[in-house]
């Protein structure tokens, strides 16, 4: 993928970053003393990622992130309206082209987990420590966000 971009460096510097919204889904465990973060595999390459997707018409960014978490991982919960961070990555498009993306990441404290959701069976889902989540993902900025993540606001759930 980097070789493709090296052939057309203007893509990286033309201001053509595409916006996406992601969900940093977490739950409390060990009687609330620790958290686990949800990581999922991408459909195409089975890389470890967090739920994310494109903006949705008529939806606010945090709402789009919550919808992605539901469709890709079957989780719902209390979502914060302001992003907890932002990271960049290179997305390989269906036509083989590469697009640089900026992902605004929204905290979701998971309060409900379902086994029947849109992309069920297309991804692997795992709950892991923040350190393990950071080890699994590829994007350097996302690694930092996961390691440094501290939930904002009051605890909502009894999951764990």
Image: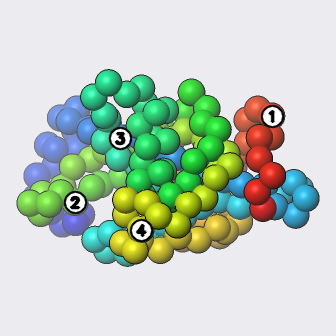
Residue 137 position (above or below residue 22): below
Nearer to us: label 1 or label 4: 4
Q: Quadrant of residue 92?
A: bottom left
Q: Is residue 20 left or right of residue 145?
A: left
Gap in angstroms between the C-alphas marked 3 and 4: 21 Å
Q: Looking at the image, which residue is at 60% across and 58% down?
A: 113
Q: Looking at the image, which residue is at 16% across and 49% down?
A: 9
In percent of width and height, residue 121 lies at: 40, 74
Gap in angstroms between the C-alphas marked 4 and 2: 22 Å
Nearer to us: label 3 or label 2: 3
Nearer to us: label 3 or label 1: 1
> Disc 4 on helix, strand or loop?
loop
Circles 1 and 4: CB atoms closer than 8 Å: no
The residue carrying mark 3 is: 20
The residue carrying mark 4 is: 120
Nearer to us: label 2 or label 1: 1
Q: 14 or 127: nearer the eye? A: 127
The residue carrying mark 2 is: 92
> Disc 2 on helix, strand or loop?
strand
Q: Earlier in the sequence, mark 3 or mark 2?
A: 3
Q: 149 or 67: nearer the eye? A: 67
Numbered tag placed on residue 154 in the rendering: 1
Circles 3 and 4: CB atoms closer than 8 Å: no
Q: 14 or 51: nearer the eye? A: 51
């Amino acid at each position: 993928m980097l070789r493709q971009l090296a052939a057309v460096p203007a893509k990286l510097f033309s201001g053509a970053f595409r916006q996406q919204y992601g969900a940093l889904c977490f739950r409390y465990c060990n009687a609330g003393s620790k958290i686990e973060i949800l990581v999922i595999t991408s459909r195409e390459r089975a890389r470890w990622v967090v739920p994310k997707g494109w903006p949705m018409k008529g939806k606010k960014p945090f709402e789009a992130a919550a919808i992605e978490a539901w469709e890709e991982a079957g989780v719902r919960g209390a979502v914060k309206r302001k992003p907890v961070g932002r990271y960049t990555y290179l997305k390989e498009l269906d036509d083989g082209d590469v697009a640089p993306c900026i992902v605004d990441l929204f905290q979701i404290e998971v309060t409900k987990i379902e086994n029947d959701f849109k992309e069920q069976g297309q991804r692997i889902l795992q709950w892991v420590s923040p350190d393990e989540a950071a080890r699994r993902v590829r994007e350097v900025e996302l690694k930092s966000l996961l390691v440094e993540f501290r939930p904002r606001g009051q605890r909502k759930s009894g999951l764990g």
